[in-house]
Amino acid sequence: MDSQNLLNIAKQFGAPLYVYDAEKIAAQYQRLTKAFKGVSSLRLNYAAKALSNISVLRLMNNLGSGLDTVSIQEVKLGLMAGFKPESIIYTPNGVSLEEIEEASALGVQINIDNLSILEQFGSKHPDVPVCIRINPHVMAGGNSNISVGHIDSKFGISIHQIPHLLRIVDLTQMNINGIHMHTGSDILDIDVFLYASEILFETAKNFKALDFIDFGSGFKVPYKAGDIETNVEELGKKLTTRFNEFCADYGKELTLAFEPGKFLVSEAGSFLAKVNVVKQTTSTVFASVDSGFNHLIRPMLYGASHQISNISNPKGRERYYSVVGYICETDTFGSNRRINEISEGDILCFKNAGAYCFTMASNYNSRYRPAEVLWHNGKAHLIRKRETFDDILRNQVDVKELFEVSEKAVVK
Ligand SMILES: *Cc1c(COP(=O)(O)O)cnc(C)c1O
């Protein structure tokens, strides 16, 4: 998919628009699979929250992926998209026992990350196999909002609570079939990850009937030139060796699982927005697009940097622009970016817009959320319609009778 394709797609479907390249997603899936080819049983469970359009989920299922879900709604979407219940792992944080029971009744793999729910669930359903999420207290991850393995993180059961955990398992006679960690997005240092894995192996020895060990995710992808990315090939080599050694010691071929979100879909996504206004101030040239952080919140939420290019004028002279949105508060996509000369009406392309972009979009400022297109075998397929005014009003209850101005009250 090149920028001419993207421009044509914008012409056909309008902007703002998300476009996903199925081929790129498949290539990332193959790359990760290949990096771990030395493991006899590998399972990649795509993290649905990165991009949860049902057609994307179908593509993942078609590639042979499993699904990692964090809410009962994602579980239901996964089932609708054709995943078998046993291919879905449900890894929520801080949800009710009722929701976990609902997911369990649908037949998906449950992953529990706190002792309170573990004890309650284990007492009521000792026969349901459960995976436990461990917090190895290893600091990984780029931004403090996305690193979830540190000491004061709300995620996982602390390794310091393993004795307590074992007492619960013993008392309830529940069956622990998997052990899991997810240390957060953006692994910069493979050795830190391997160190956390050692803690997981150590913990795993306490359980006699494991089927899998899930190492979560956090594969970092480059967002701009010079960005470090996780070297998955090197990680694959090193972790495979350690994993196979562990299995030999453990006496059973376990499944090695990962739950990549960003790695699979980030680069496959492009966000297209039209320039409404080019505004020259004394210090800056602003390009205001027909979108805002209601559609792509990562720059404002995480300080994320998405590359921006002008696909309408790819050969134009480069100038400096601040690209901003239309939301009525600070809404900056990128400051002082070198971009080919921008005219009003041009289409700008934001790269790495596959993961945590559409799924975080909102109707703030009562704007419509964008449409989504999947590019597959050289053809563009609409996979989500653009919203309309009906979508803005949907579920609102207009109690107009409370505020009706009666005829009599009107002073003439
Ligand atoms: C968000 C999440 C992932 C995916 O993380 P990425 O950085 O997008 O790969 C995996 N596992 C769990 C439990 C998550 O919450």
Image (spheres, rainbow, N blue to C red):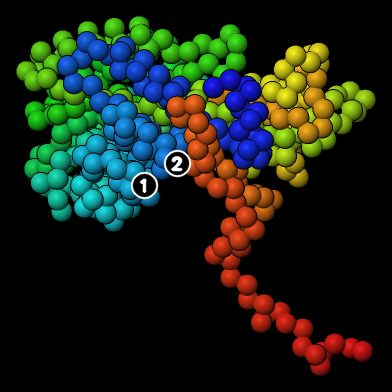
Indicate the quadrant containing the C terminus: top left, top right, bottom left or bottom right.
Answer: bottom right
Quarter of the image holding residue 273? top right
Crowding at label 1, few (<14), some or many (≥20) Cα neighbours within 10 Å? some
Query: Which mark identifies residue 49?
Result: none
User: 307 left or right of 289?
Assistant: left
Between 247 and 87, the one nearer to me in the picture: 87
Between 288 and 9, the one nearer to me in the picture: 9
Residue 58, horizontal then vertical, whole percent: 36, 38
Residue 15, horizontal then vertical, whole percent: 66, 39
Residue drawn at (32%, 28%) of the image: 63
Note whether ligand 1 is within 8 Å of mark 1.
no
What amino acid type is highlighted by mark number 2? Asn
User: 155 left or right of 2?
Assistant: left
Residue 306, horizontal then vertical, whole percent: 62, 24
Q: Identify the residue at the far left of this view.
A: 251
Q: Secondary structure at mark 2?
A: loop
Quarter of the image holding residue 6? top right
User: 404 left or right of 176?
Assistant: right
Query: Mark 2 touching mark 1, by CB under 8 A?
Result: no
Regarding residue 95, the answer to whether it shows in the image is no
Crowding at label 2, few (<14), some or many (≥20) Cα neighbours within 10 Å? some
Between 114 and 288, the one nearer to me in the picture: 288
Residue drawn at (49%, 42%) of the image: 383
Q: CA distance from mark 2 to mark 1?
A: 9 Å
Label 2: which residue?
53
Q: Secondary structure at mark 1?
A: helix
Label 1: which residue?
77
Indicate the quadrant containing the N terminus: top left, top right, bottom left or bottom right.
Answer: top right
Residue 348, horizontal then vertical, whole percent: 70, 28
Regarding residue 236, the answer to whether it shows in the image is yes
